[in-house]
Image (spheres, helix red, strand yellow):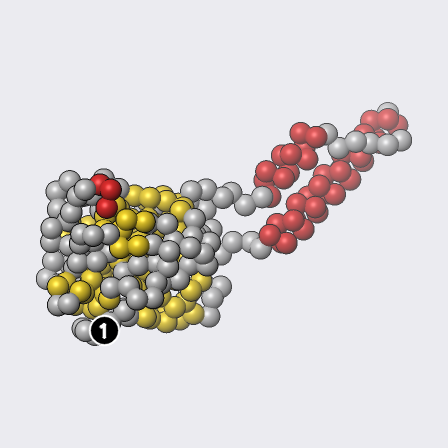
Amino acid sequence: MKYRLPLAAILALLLINLPAWSAVSTGSLGDCDQYTDVVFDKIGVINPQYTVSGAPIYESVTVSMGSVLAGQTVGSTNNTLNNNIPTGPLQLAANAPNVETLFDLSLPTNIVVGGSVEGKYFTTPLAILFDKPVSHVCFYLGDLDVNTPTVIEAYAADGSTVERMNNLSPGTHQYSVGENTGANLISGISIYIPEESGGMDWEGFAVSDLSFSVGVVPEPTTVAIWTLLGIVAFSAAYGSSRSREAKN
């Protein structure tokens, strides 16, 4: 006798075994203390780059900082982009305004990364680039004006947007951007003012206390194997049960 595995059972197994991809959203700030720190330890470093060891599943992660991602273009006023869409694969733009490590009393550890144009500080957008995708990123951002038009935008490696955060609070605050399931989706972050908003953050902005985490997720091949094994096991059990029913 032939036995058919119900379609509903197959779909249920697939849904159980497939990874749950979801949009990047504001994460839990309480988790930031558990993340891998990027230590700003020297003032005056232009377009700093840090290689951090010890992240799960990666031997190391290199974090590079600049003002603009390739494909984006700087606006006509401080901290603005008139095109926020980067090109993939994600990388920092060449011939863009510099950023550097500076001293700023308004941010927690005082050594910050901010824009630097001809001796004028905190005057550019900011870009953070990870050479391998990560799941969560935390940082302090300040000192923002009231009703600031500043945006935090996270991108995947191909340059597509995975989340855009606006309506940020004035002053200095810690922000956490992360993927709910721990999937490693974030390859870059831009902090900028859209030129079309017509707004400005008069004092500019900088970041400090940058940290990130890496999620451990199953490889697609592993997911497929476990899905197949689940279907086979369920089919065998279902067929055995139907066979006993037929004998009775």
- Residue 121 lies left or right of residue 221; in this view the side is left
* Rendered location of residue 206, percent (x, y): 19, 58
Q: What residue sits 60% from the left and 43% below the top?
A: 17
Report which residue position mark 1 lands on: 45
Residue kind at label 1, given as amino acid type = Val
Image position of 57 with respect to 163: above or below: below
Image position of 138 with respect to 119: above or below: above
- Residue 247 lies left or right of residue 8; in this view the side is right
* Rendered location of residue 164, percent (x, y): 33, 44
Q: What residue sits 67% from the left and 51% below the top?
A: 225
Q: Foreground residue, 12 or 177?
A: 177
- Count the marks: how many? 1
Residue 47 can be seen, yes or no: yes
* Rendered location of residue 1, percent (x, y): 89, 31
Mark 1 is surrounded, within 10 Å at the Cα level, by few (under 14), some (14 to 19) or many (20 or more) other residues, namely some
Q: Quadrant of the C terminus?
A: top right
* Rendered location of residue 119, percent (x, y): 12, 68
- Residue 66 lies left or right of residue 157; in this view the side is left
Secondary element type, mark 1: loop
Q: Foreground residue, 66 or 1?
A: 66
